Image (tube, grey):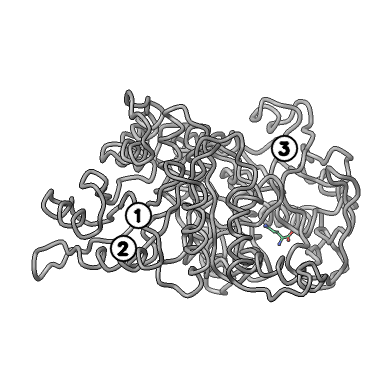
Amino acid sequence: MARFIFITGGVVSSLGKGLMAASLGALLQARGYRVRIRKFDPYLNVDPGTMSPYQHGEVYVTDDGAETDLDLGHYERFTGVASRQSDNITSGRIYQQIITRERRGDYLGATVQVIPHVTDAIKSFALAETDDLDFVLCEIGGTVGDIESLPFIEAIRQLKNELGRGNSISIHVTLVPFIAAAGELKTKPTQHSVRELASLGVQPDVLVCRSERPLPEGEKAKIALFCNVPKEAVISALDAKSIYAVPLQYHGEGLDAEVLKAFGLPVGAAPDLGRWDDIVDRIVNPEGEVTVGVVGKYVGLPDAYKSLNEALVHGGIANRVKVNIRWIDAELFEQADSDIAASLEPLNAILVPGAFGERGAEGKIASIRFARERRVPYFGICFGMQMACVEAARNLAGIAGASSTEFGPTPEPVVGLITEWMGSDGLEKREQGGDLGGTMRLGAYQAKLAGNSHVAGIYGAGEISERHRHRYEVNTAYKERLEETGLAFTGMSPDGALPEIVERPEHPWFVGVQFHPELKSKPFAPHPLFASFIEAAVRQSRLV
Ligand code: GLN
């Protein structure tokens, strides 16, 4: 039977609980255990799919087409275990299920309540599909004390009891602030937070204390005394020089050993963390640097492009270079007095990422034109591929009105809404003007690559599977006219109906993909497209 690790946070949000869970998962894996990490989100949205990236950061998409919390991206990048729909649940989804059942009469007249109905649903979510695992790490979003998280904490309390002694532990992540005026680290917020958690019936076994300065032994002892945990189980967690140094840092502080001890398991020999040493070495000791411009829409909030940011870092790891990312607001290039060349000339490569809506589209099209004409490496992801096709149609094929139906009716729908496509389970359909939630082509789809194309060489494969999240597609009615502009359609859906990849064979590096390769990149296995894109940026940097 799998053992369960429940992870809660206290004092403030943004303490890096997700990164802690991901790092602990990686450390347990390095010790030979099979792990899976799950996220419980207490908010009432059914999934984060319809939430603004400004509010919630990026939406992370799984192979099985779930729109999930971005923490699942951390989990997957650190453990290499592909996330699934069953790894992320929200209060909204739980209530939706319960209310659907109630309307069907499944409860046979019973009063439907938070305890036991909501808590039972949370527990069965935690326990589902865990037979082949050694450890299930369950991270509860939010902060202890939030109204929304109460049913989750209650479900943990019940589960700890039901799973029996030795089969579950709880880790609480808190903040130990440094008060400059007093010159001291303060443990009181941690004490209060643990007391709050304990008052809900959950006594933590391990405390992870985030602080700006190392926790002195005396402070650890004080926290241990007041919070009822062994002193060695008070783990000090400082900011790291790279997120990929976090597993090494936690191991150095004894986190994985304390977790095993809390389960009563032998700690044994130190795990081989050579993979992480190598990654950190490549990040800390680069042999050069390149600057990539990301011309996007949500550039004010780096979390909105979390996986993209990481995939670019991974491309740097693959080439042993530092990747400086310049986030550029596409709308700046739509102003009459903007000097687009001056902004883009210092860049070694240009990327237009995924996006929804018309805002900034013209600025992106102008950037793509610059990259094409100046022979600067260009990578278009999803919207960035669609706009590369619109750019070619307008500026090379003479189709002045070329546009996407996403922006409204157009006589030249180079990008248009597709209402039917072949999924792995047969024909999938959607309606014009349907609901926004759950109406996209989502999750993993296969693509066939043209034999001697650049991308087939990059992937070293003829058939690939990548994750999608979009409504619109490049319209194959324009394929021939676009091909005449030098744009090659080198990746297509297996039935040949949907363009998946376009490239310019005559350009140093110009690739547009309808999917999101950034979602599958890992520090120890950089995605081939990102590795190749950064390699092209390095070549470009040597030309100037
Ligand atoms: N808005 C475009 C579509 O829905 C692109 C989506 C994306 O870039 N993820 O097809």
> Tag 2: Cα neighbours inside 10 Å, few (<14), some, or many (≥20)?
many
What's the residue type where badge 1 is placed? Answer: Pro
Q: In this figure, which residue is indicated by the disc labeled 3? A: 465
Label 3 close to label 1 by CB (< 8 Å): no
**Closer to us: 516 or 39:** 39
Left or right of 173: which side holds 367? right
**Closer to us: 357 or 422:** 422
Residue 325 picture location, percent across and down: 45, 51
Q: In this figure, which residue is indicated by the disc labeled 2? A: 194
Number of numbered labels in the structure image? 3
Residue at disc 2, secondary structure: helix
- Marks 3/1: CA–CA distance: 41 Å
What's the residue type where badge 3 is placed? Answer: Ser
Ligand 1's image quarter is bottom right
Label 2 close to label 3 by CB (< 8 Å): no
Discs 3/1, front: 1
Q: Tell me the quadrant of the picture where the C terminus can be found.
A: top left
Residue at disc 3, secondary structure: strand
Q: In this figure, which residue is indicated by the disc labeled 1? A: 204
**Res. 114 image quadrant:** bottom right
> Tag 3: Cα neighbours inside 10 Å, few (<14), some, or many (≥20)?
some
